[in-house]
Amino acid sequence: MPPIPADPTVLHPMPEHPRVVLLKPLVKSPLIEVGDFSYYDDPDDPTAFETRNVLYHYGPERLVIGKYCALGTGTRFIMNGANHRMDGPSTFPFPTMGGSWSEHFDLITDLPGRGDTVVGNDVWFGHGTTVMPGVRIGHGAIIAAGAVVTGDVPDYGIVGGNPARLIRTRYDAADIARLLAVAWWDWPVQHITRHVRTIMSGTVADLEEAAAQIDQP
């Protein structure tokens, strides 16, 4: 009997732990895209992720999160709608307060944006991390608890602090290139199921060997 993969469409993959939700079946906003099996863990209300964890998201910038990402409690994405003008004496958004001030709405609609916020595959976010607008986080990265990510994170990089700095990479450049070529997160889910132990604890060579078996019966 072939191994049975997990189901990426189930909201609560661990029924005994309702604090964990898969994000793909949860999110409704057309401005948010999440890959299979990426999850969020929160003891209070994980189903409120779109309103409590994706902030100031008025568009058109998008939040894109890859597959197999783990988001710890309190992971938040600050989107471009949080921006204020900084080229004049005051940063206060007067036009949003109404009255005749609203006649100057053009002063806050032409703010520069940093584009989409994009998270790669297999990224681990520690407790209470914050990601600023327009950041790009590479595949296999780890974001330490409490980190404030203000700039791009390389593939398989480990960052921490406020502002977050690169602590080290998980592999050397040659092995990172090999891992990106393998791209296990794009394997058919049945093949992933057969090779979970290799993906979690194997070597780069083990992954390459498993990748070579994808088309084999």
Image (spheres, rainbow, N blue to C red):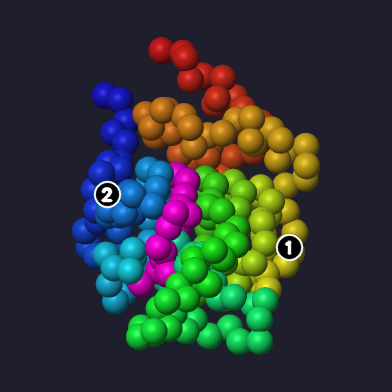
Label 2: which residue?
Answer: 25
- Secondary structure of the residue carrying tag 1 is strand
Horizontal and vertical percent position of residue 121: 52, 45
Q: Is 181 on the left or on the right of 217, as rendered?
A: right
Residue at screen point 28% across, 33% down: 4
Label 1: which residue?
Answer: 166
- Secondary structure of the residue carrying tag 2 is loop
Q: Are marks 2 and 1 in contact (CB under 8 Å)?
A: no
What amino acid is labelled 2 in the image? Pro
**Is residue 202 visible in the rendered structure shown here?**
yes
Residue at screen point 60% across, 72% down: 148
Horizontal and vertical percent position of residue 125: 52, 63
Point out which mark residue 21 bears. Answer: none
What amino acid is labelled 1 in the image? Leu
Residue 164, quarter of the rendered image: bottom right
The residue range painted magenta reads: 52-70
Q: CA distance from mark 2 to mark 1?
A: 32 Å
Residue at screen point 44% across, 79% down: 95
